[in-house]
Amino acid sequence: MANIKSQIKRNKTNEKARLRNKAVRSSLKTSIRKFREATAAGDTEGATQLMRQAARQLDKAASKGVIHANAAANKKSAMAQALTKAGS
């Protein structure tokens, strides 16, 4: 346990950030999973909507530093490929 006042404060803010990041990552995984389920079911129209929503969440998470920008780009690219594959 920290004795220094500033470190106690940092521990509190770090914990808040950790929980916020965990929630963002969880919702990201959920939106990506919903997109995958829609493409597997063959619902291209619904999958397009879900992809737009997931891409927006990925961009937000990357801009906030929750995930790396390249990781977001890779996931968006993979979703776009899956969508074109399901559409054809």
Image (cartoon, grey):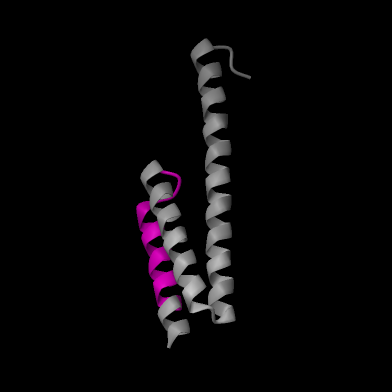
| Rendered location of residue 66, percent (x, y) | 45, 45
**Farthest residue in the right direction?**
1
Q: Nearer the viewer, residue 32 or 45?
A: 45
Q: Nearer the viewer, residue 60 or 43?
A: 43
Q: Residue at x 57, y 44 (%)?
A: 22
| Rendered location of residue 60, percent (x, y) | 40, 48
Q: Which residues are magenta?
A: 65-82
Q: Nearer the viewer, residue 25 or 53?
A: 53
Q: Residue 55 falls in which quadrant of the image?
A: bottom left
- Magenta segment: does it hold 78? yes
Q: Residue 15 falls in which quadrant of the image?
A: top right
Reply above or below: 9 against 20. above
| Rendered location of residue 36, percent (x, y) | 55, 71
Q: Relative to residue 1, is residue 56 drawn left or right?
A: left
Reply above or below: 39 against 57. below
Tell me the quarter of the image containing the C terminus: bottom left
Tell me the quarter of the image containing the N terminus: top right
